[in-house]
Amino acid sequence: MTSAFEIAAPARIVFGPGTVGQVPEIARALGARPLLVTGASPARASGLVAALERAGVSAPLPPLSVAGEPTVALVRDAAALARGAGCDLVIAFGGGSALDAGKAIAALLGNGGDPLDYLEVIGRGRSLARPGVPFVAVPTSAGTGSEVTKNAVLASPEHQMKASLRSPLMLARAAVVDPDLLVGLPAAVIASSGLDALSQLIEPFVCLRANPFTDALARAGIRRSARSLRRVYEAAARGGGRGDGDGGAHGRELGDAREDLAMANLFGGLCLANAGLGAVHGFAAPIGGTWPAPHGAACAALLPHAMRVNQRAIEARAPDHPARARFHELAALLTGRGDATAAEGIAWLDDLVAALGIPGLGRYGVTAADIPALVQRARVASSMKANPVPLTDDELTEIAARAL
Ligand SMILES: [Zn+2]
């Protein structure tokens, strides 16, 4: 925790219900021949395609649909196609996978070369020399915060790993966050993406690189997520995800709750990009590279256990640690009670994860026999460096075992 900091964020962040309507105007100022990148269902973007065309911004290629987490090959091929078609702008409309793919393609269009020239760990790790073509990010889930971060995570099946393309030059020129786009998301997606967003607020709040700027965002985001995540999930689970068609009081409240989630996600992205993370994301990286566990679901399964082990380690070994008070404050933010203890805050997380139907990591094939190797990989993951205290192998083993 430090009072010296530097903040990097997109040049423009536009937030609010209906703001997706501003995308054509924003795009027109940045380029004339966009590549549109969408999630698994490109039909969701048909309204945006039509609005772009009405604004005189027509895409030379059909939308690129990114069904799963993007691979090195997908980004390589898409960049070649887009270059051939003269694309001078990338607009990504979708969840974290579509945004990461779009961000990486935009970077390659501005720099040339192959993804492996720039990828960390599995590639040559060269720095980007130039900005990419302008990138506009329009998230349609409330999970990864990718619209405001400077990296794109790509999977390489041949290396059995995920690695990042990372550069301050990859920040979006504009992030357009419209909470209305969350209408109709399946309950399971709300659960896993919402808990990823909450992890991305909590880990930066207690981490070693927390700073006053990210603290303010973390406090505001945790409060909003705590009061609204369960509510939006339950409405979606009842099939009421679209329940504000009549504009009634119930619908308006649900709209407010979705706005809370979209804002919590945005703030979490800014926190992780400008502070750091911790053990939850330290485990999520090797898990995501090895098993078919969606990032958000893995983070959700790990979150309460990582917090409990961290809090206990601080009490036992570092009672003067500044994060100690943070765990008390976290409990108050989560429960809404100023006198809540750190343990009560973590128990509140246990209850939330259970109420949202998050499966253990075993669901994705992780077994007790995998834990020793997993611990060794998590220990050296980049996110682990900002964890509030160094954890022992026994402590890391406990987190993984409880998350099974
Ligand atoms: Zn995450």
Image: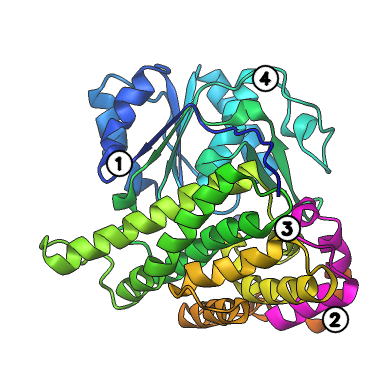
> Which is in the foreground here, disc 2 or disc 3?
3
Name the quarter showing ligand 1: bottom right
Q: Amino acid at mark 2?
A: Ala
Q: Are marks 1 and 3 in contact (CB under 8 Å)?
A: no
Specify the quadrant of the image occupied by residue 103: top right
Question: For this rendering, which residue is in front, 139 or 9?
Answer: 9
**Residue identified by numbered label 4:** 111
Determine crowd level at label 3: few under 14, some 14-19, many 20+ residues with C-alpha closer than 10 A.
many
Position of residue 227 measured from the top left corner of the image (x, y, whole percent): 38, 68
Instruction: Answer whether labels 2 and 3 touch (C-beta < 8 Å).
Output: no
Residue 324: percent from left, percent from top: 70, 67
Q: Which residues are magenta?
A: 375-404
Compute the Cα span from label 1 to label 3. 33 Å
Please name the amino acid that badge 3 sits on: Ala
Q: Who comes first in sequence, dot 2 or dot 3?
A: 3
How far apart marks 4 and 3 lie (CA) works out to 27 Å
The residue indicated by pointer 2 is 369
Q: Is residue 4 above or below residue 243?
A: above
Residue at 48 percent of width and 67 percent of height: 333
Q: Secondary structure at mark 2?
A: helix
Q: Is 394 situated left or right of 304 in this image? A: right
- Residue 285: assigned label: 3
Give the residue at x 71% y 59%: 322
